[in-house]
Image (cartoon, grey):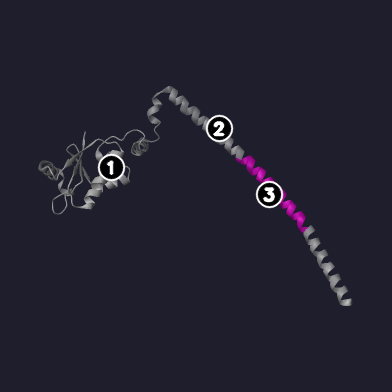
């Protein structure tokens, strides 16, 4: 399948030139094979593009502006729909292509497939060894959860013990601090009386 990009090589509009460059540059960056078809110098290309852009996608004047993107004879869209697909990481879907393994789009499709199928383990349950592995994993997972819960209980007990010791220290400090304050007040009173007597 060949991606066809209908462009105007001699467009006077800088906006159209920028849009064309954006589409071509992005396809080159993704290493997607495409063919540039010039509508400015080739009347057949211009007529084919105008005839094959769906009616609901044509502007009010009926003449679609480049760039227009096709996958063989299947219409993909114009620059605006291409830009939306680019923003959503769905360019391969937009172009009607299978995303390469490892691409963001392939990962999104894989995640969507897993969500659609459930957890993804149902397909593997036909194999007895896989069943055994899943059961062992679940049992080990439960054991690990119990282990973590024991750790949490131990840490909580340790924290509670520290808090109790801190409270005891604070309570034992209070009377000592109160005594010091009382002694300090008595000393001041004695000093004041001594200075009054002088």
Residue 148 is labelled as none
Q: Residue furthest top?
A: 128
Q: Secondary structure at mark 2?
A: helix
The residue carrying pointer 2 sits among few (fewer than 14), some (14 to 19) or many (20 or more) residues within 10 Å by Cα, namely few
Residue 5 or residue 113, whichever sits in front: 5
Residue 129 or residue 64, whichever sits in front: 64
Q: Which residue is mark 3?
A: 163
In reply to whether residue 128 is colored magenta, the answer given is no
| Left or right of residue 160: residue 66 | left
The x, y position of residue 3, in whole percent, is 22, 37
The residue carrying pointer 1 sits among few (fewer than 14), some (14 to 19) or many (20 or more) residues within 10 Å by Cα, namely few
Residue 143 is labelled as 2
Q: Looking at the image, is mark 1 or mark 3 earlier in the sequence?
A: 1
Q: Looking at the image, is mark 2 or mark 3 earlier in the sequence?
A: 2
Q: How many marks?
A: 3
The x, y position of residue 65, in whole percent, is 18, 49
Q: Secondary structure at mark 1?
A: helix
The x, y position of residue 17, in whole percent, is 22, 49
Q: Secondary structure at mark 3?
A: helix
Q: Which residue is mark 1?
A: 25
Task: For the C terminus, give its image quadrant.
Answer: bottom right
Residue 176 or residue 132, whichever sits in front: 176
Q: Are marks 1 and 3 in contact (CB under 8 Å)?
A: no
Q: Looking at the image, is mark 1 or mark 2 earlier in the sequence?
A: 1
User: Gap between marks 1 and 3, in whole Å?
Assistant: 64 Å
> Magenta residues?
152-175
């Amino acid at each position: 399948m060949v991606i066809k990009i209908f462009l105007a090589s001699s467009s006077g509009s800088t906006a159209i030139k920028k849009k064309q460059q954006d589409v071509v540059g992005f396809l080159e960056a993704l290493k997607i094979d495409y063919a540039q078809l010039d509508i400015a110098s080739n009347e057949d290309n211009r007529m084919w593009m105008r005839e094959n852009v769906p009616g609901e996608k044509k502007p009010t004047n009926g003449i679609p502006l480049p760039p227009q993107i096709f996958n063989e004879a299947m219409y993909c869209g114009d620059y605006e729909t291409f830009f939306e697909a680019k923003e959503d990481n769905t360019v391969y879907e937009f172009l009607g292509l299978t995303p390469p393994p490892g691409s963001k789009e392939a990962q999104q499709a894989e995640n969507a497939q897993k969500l659609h199928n459930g957890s993804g383990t149902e397909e593997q349950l036909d194999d007895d060894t896989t069943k055994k592995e899943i059961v062992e994993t679940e049992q080990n997972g439960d054991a690990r959860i119990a282990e973590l819960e024991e750790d949490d209980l131990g840490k909580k007990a340790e924290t509670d013990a520290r808090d109790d010791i801190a409270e005891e220290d604070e309570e034992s400090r209070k009377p000592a601090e109160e005594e010091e304050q009382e002694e300090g007040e008595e000393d001041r009173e004695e000093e004041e009386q001594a200075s009054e007597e002088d």
